[in-house]
Image: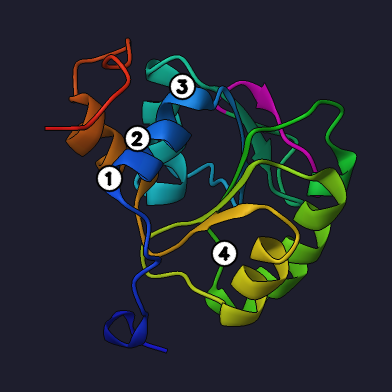
């Protein structure tokens, strides 16, 4: 599936803004040790904005000085968002794990989409975001330099 084939997730700017401002703990599935990859610099950006990032990567014991978990099922804390940096064909398995830990939001990064995963999670009350970069959306809706969220209400 190419990015052109990915349908829109249908979320409004306000809904995405609320995800970003009401979330604190983010499990990043597929987080990378390579600082040149989005799966490293996006979580690094999120950390700089005050989010608690929990790396999930079975081939790393530590990323950015943080303990890395082998799977979502190994997490020892509740997470608000599962942020996915895995190929689209691997997303259904990640969604199955996410369903067991019940995050409020399941976020598939830019270029990533699984219709079956989205349906499964949405039908179980989990908000699903896809084909969006969490860093880019944060910069766009909250401002690049902002650590503090804007006041609630319509987003200009």
SS for dot 3: helix
Q: Is residue 122 shown left or right of residue 51?
A: right
10 or 106, which lies in front?
10
Asked if the residue at tag 2 contacts the one at tag 3, i.e. Cβ–Cβ closer than 8 Å, the answer is no
Give the dominant element type of the magenta stretch: helix, strand or loop.
Answer: loop
Q: CA distance from mark 3 to mark 2?
A: 17 Å
Q: Residue at x 40, y 66 (%)?
A: 9
Q: Residues within 10 Å of mark 2 (few under 14, many from 20)?
A: many
Q: Residues within 10 Å of mark 1 (few under 14, many from 20)?
A: some
Q: Which residue is mark 4?
A: 86
Q: Indicate the position of residue 145 as horizontal and vertical percent values.
A: 19, 16
Query: Of discs 4 and 2, which sits in the foreground?
Result: 2
Query: Of discs 3 and 2, which sits in the foreground?
Result: 2
Q: CA distance from mark 4 to mark 2?
A: 23 Å
Q: Residue 13 bears which disc, if any?
A: 1
Asked if the residue at tag 1 contacts the one at tag 3, i.e. Cβ–Cβ closer than 8 Å, the answer is no
SS for dot 2: helix
Q: Is residue 71 shown left or right of residue 111?
A: right
Q: Residue at x 32, y 12 (%)?
A: 147
SS for dot 1: helix
Q: Which residue is mark 3?
A: 47
Looking at the rendering, the stretch of residues picked out in magenta corresponds to 64-71
- Considering every residue shown, the one lying at the far top of the view is 148
Pointer 4 or 3: first along the chain: 3
Q: CA distance from mark 4 to mark 3?
A: 20 Å
38 or 25, which lies in front?
25
Query: Of discs 3 and 1, which sits in the foreground?
Result: 1
Q: CA distance from mark 2 to mark 1?
A: 6 Å
Q: Indicate the position of residue 72 as horizontal and vertical percent values.
A: 79, 47
Pointer 4 or 2: first along the chain: 2
Q: Residues within 10 Å of mark 3 (few under 14, many from 20)?
A: some
């Amino acid at each position: 599936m190419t990015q052109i084939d990915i349908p829109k997730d249908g979320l409004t700017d306000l809904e995405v803004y609320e995800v970003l401002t009401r979330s604190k703990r983010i499990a990043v599935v597929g987080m990378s040790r390579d600082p040149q990859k989005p799966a490293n610099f996006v979580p690094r950006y999120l950390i700089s904005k005050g989010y608690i990032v929990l790396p999930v990567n079975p081939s790393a014991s530590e990323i950015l000085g943080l303990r890395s978990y082998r799977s979502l099922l190994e997490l020892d804390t509740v997470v608000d968002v599962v942020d996915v940096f895995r190929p689209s064909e691997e997303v259904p398995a990640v969604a199955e794990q996410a369903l067991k830990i019940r995050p409020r939001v399941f976020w598939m990064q830019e270029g990533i989409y699984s219709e079956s995963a989205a349906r499964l999670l949405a039908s179980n009350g989990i908000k699903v975001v896809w084909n969006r970069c969490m860093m880019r959306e944060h910069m766009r809706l909250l401002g690049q330099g902002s650590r503090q969220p804007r006041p609630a209400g319509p987003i200009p």
